[in-house]
Image (cartoon, rainbow, N blue to C red):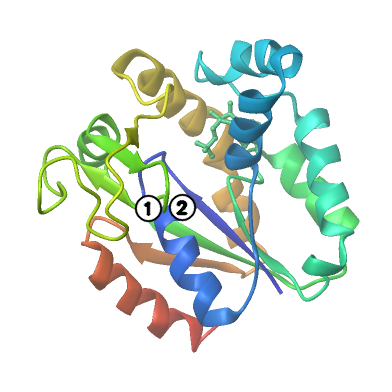
């Protein structure tokens, strides 16, 4: 089964994809993560990817979809996966349907724009174990030391600033939101109240998984 995670930036898709992955024993395919890695290691690609990513725009669907198609053809994904950040528009959703025979389910992480602004603008990550923190409400217990692995280096995502976030929200509302109706009309859309804290959302997801 392929589970598509949909929601505003900062709605918790990335965080909860890890919980879902360990619960369902499915791999995560995060297009944003892949692009960030490519941009880090490949100077040439980095310039063209950052043209989109650092403006809060979508990378062209042909590029993303070709990438997803290649990944989904790998053995690792033959039992399905959790898709974090794909599809991002109807064109991508239709493409996904056309390249796999897997059952598809969608989970919508429902959250308000006010909540995501605080989550995103305060978000930082341990460079070693990738634990995510927040300057407003979830700092490490000892300042600048990761609770999990003890590392002292953290990173802010380059596109987590106010101006880019505004554009990412706009793009989400214009391009991604219509996917909700697309999946709803197929009877495969599920909702989770993503304004709740991490543990609470995990509980909601556990209950949801029994029904989908
Ligand atoms: P994310 O980590 O999902 O917020 O993605 C970060 C950035 O990568 C987005 O703002 C887009 O520029 C790009 N990106 C990720 N997934 C997609 C996608 N499915 N379609 C187009 N662009 C994408």
Quadrant of the rendered image containing residue 127: top left
**62 or 178: which is nearer to us?**
62
The N terminus, quarter of image: bottom right
Residue at the spot 22% in from the left edge and 34% down from the top edge? 122
Residue at the spot 27% in from the left edge and 64% down from the top edge? 198
Q: Position of residue 192 (x, y in %)?
A: 37, 65
Q: Position of residue 45 (x, y in %)?
A: 74, 18
Q: Is mark 2 within 8 Å of ligand 1?
A: yes
Q: Which mark is residue 14?
A: 2
User: Looking at the image, is 148 positioned above or below residue 63?
Assistant: below
Quadrant of the rendered image containing residue 188: bottom right
Q: Quadrant of ligand 1?
A: top right
SS label for mark 2: helix
Q: Which mark is residue 204?
A: none
SS label for mark 1: loop
Residue at the spot 58% in from the left edge and 45% down from the top edge? 85
Q: Position of residue 107 (x, y in %)?
A: 51, 63
Q: CA distance from mark 1 to mark 2?
A: 6 Å
User: Looking at the image, is 162 positioned above or below residue 203?
Assistant: above
The C terminus, quarter of image: bottom right
Left or right: where 80 falls relative to 73: left
Pointer 1 with pointer 2, Cβ within 8 A? yes
Q: Which mark is residue 12?
A: 1
Q: Is residue 111 visible?
A: no
């Amino acid at each position: 089964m392929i589970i598509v995670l949909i929601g505003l930036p900062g709605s918790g898709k990335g965080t909860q994809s890890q919980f879902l992955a360990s619960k369902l024993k499915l791999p995560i395919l995060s297009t944003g993560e892949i692009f960030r890695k490519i941009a880090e290691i490949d100077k040439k690609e980095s310039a063209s990817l950052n043209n989109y990513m650092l403006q809060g725009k979508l990378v062209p669907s042909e590029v993303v979809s070709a990438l997803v198609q290649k990944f989904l053809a790998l053995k690792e994904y033959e039992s399905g996966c959790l898709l974090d950040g794909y599809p991002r528009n109807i064109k991508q959703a239709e493409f996904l349907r056309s390249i796999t025979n897997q059952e598809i389910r969608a989970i919508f992480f429902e959250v308000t724009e006010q909540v995501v602004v605080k989550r995103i603008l305060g978000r930082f990550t341990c460079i070693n174990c990738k634990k995510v923190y927040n300057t407003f409400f979830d700092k490490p217990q000892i300042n600048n030391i990761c609770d999990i692995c003890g590392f002292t280096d953290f990173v802010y995502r380059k596109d987590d600033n106010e101006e880019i976030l505004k554009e990412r929200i706009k793009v989400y509302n214009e391009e991604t939101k219509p996917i909700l109706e697309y999946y709803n009309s197929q009877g495969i859309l599920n909702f989770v109240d993503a304004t709740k804290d991490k543990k609470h959302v995990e509980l909601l997801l556990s209950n949801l998984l029994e029904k989908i």
